[in-house]
Amino acid sequence: MEFNNPNLPTEVTLMQGCSSEAERASIVAGGLDLLRAALAEKFHGHITTVAEEIRTTSRLLRELASRAQVHRSRVPVVLNHLNVLLPCLQRTLRDITAYYEDKTMSREIRWRTMYSKMTEEAVGLPLSQRFVLYNHFLALLEQLLTRSPIFDLNTLESLRTRIMTLREQRGIPPPPMQAGPVVRQELMSLATMQEPNSHWAEQIFSLPLPSRTALKHLKPSRSFGPWFPRGHLYMPPGSTILFRRVFDNDQLSILVYINPVNQSPYLLVRTSQGGVPWFSLRGAHELCIAREGSALQLKRWSRSDQCSKLWVVLYFLTWEEMVLFYCTFVALKARNTLTVQVHPSEYKLQREKRLFQAQIIDDGFKHSLIVYQDSHTRGIRLHAAVWEGELRQCPVWTAFVTHQSQSRTWLSRRSRHRVWLKDVQLYVFCNTYRQENMRQNKSGAFEIYFASEEGATRFREVFAASSPEPSETNEGAPGPSK
């Protein structure tokens, strides 16, 4: 395939690939039009459907390449997905061309053979539906690139898996594990860049997950109401949509937005009963959150019954998504001026074991750094929280510890108080924290400055089994050095 040119940056090669495959798709659609014109009318419907889907593919590829010029800083997040799609798409387009240009067969036989063979090789997936798959994937990539609040990561991963299966069926070699290191410098830059006047929560679910740890014992997510029909609940004009998450193939969705009247976050749940959508709305300050197995439970207070009741139960496919939703909700609630109180239990995600805790000086703030391990998945994450004051224990950032921690260069002790971590991606839950201030070094490593030497030593010991011996150095530090 043509999408790994060692003489050009990966970004340039793949974006050029979008443009070239868009042109190829346009030509192939035109070729199918000519084939249709030469056949009996009974064939026109299927050929037209395939040709129109291919034209949609061409349009989406061009739009993606164009938007990449505007959202250049976010291009790295779509590169690996394009590396999965483009070779498979190219093979499909070339196969179609080979069939309709085969003059050893009549035009009718060309079409019949093309349609049956290409459906068979995709294990029964009709040719038009193959392009529907490609187009859905491309539309999601555009949403990911532009940080759309309706982007759904689970759907993207599901479609990616289907395309990988199709590649395997066609004998296409698997793509490189990553277009660059697992957490590339570009992604680090992307994570630290925030658009002016944007809310921190808009970025949380638009960053790629560094790992996906599956949760077990999943059930359908449920909404318990009270429900209202469409048109009875409204978002005020000027509301800022922070994100939208979907569950069970969009049978249930939850949209989080900022009300411009009181600058407070609200959650709008949509569910479906008998094909009819129903809605329920609550402010973050009106809800309490807790984990139950692979689900997060949001409860509301019932004034009539004078007790708390389930409002919604959300089952997550991955531990990482559960953690991000939990931390996001808690931070939104804690920083909300309408919130009367956050119960101490809400600051602790159940079924996590604390492996380590110490005070750090983080971008000039005192934070508590905790290493948590999930009791179900054994996943490990770093968690920074406010050290003192009204927001004590409120999440500031979290980072998932991936297989990169097995590298001998992942963790290094730079001084008595300083530790550097390479290839670690932070998810930040406030607008005042700037992680770039903790990456002021040539390698872009994230620096953790411990308030005590003992804290740095104990942190190092947590990962001692998979990390090299510490190396002392005085290379540039963003915080005080001792």
Image (spheres, rainbow, N blue to C red):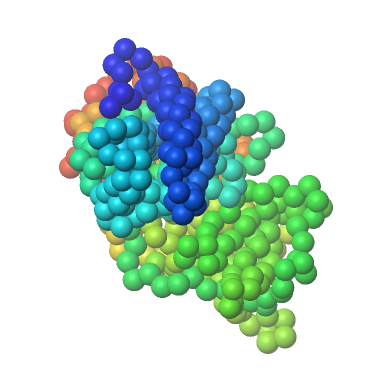
Q: Name which residue lies at 72% across and 68% down.
A: 230
Front residue of 255/94: it is 94
Q: Horizontal and vertical percent for residue 166?
A: 29, 47
Q: Horizontal and vertical percent for residue 41?
A: 49, 51
Which residue reaches farthest bottom?
305
Q: Is residue 332 above or below residue 417?
A: below
Front residue of 39/387: it is 39
Q: Is residue 248 above or below residue 452?
A: below
Q: Where's the N terminus, which quadrant? A: top left
Front residue of 28/11: it is 28
Which residue reaches farthest top?
7
Q: Residue 83 vs residue 338: left or right? A: left
Q: Residue 427 vs residue 309: left or right? A: left
- Decide if residue 182 is in sight here: no
Q: Horizontal and vertical percent for residue 143?
A: 55, 41
Q: Residue 325 vs residue 123: left or right? A: right
- Decide if residue 79 is in sight here: yes
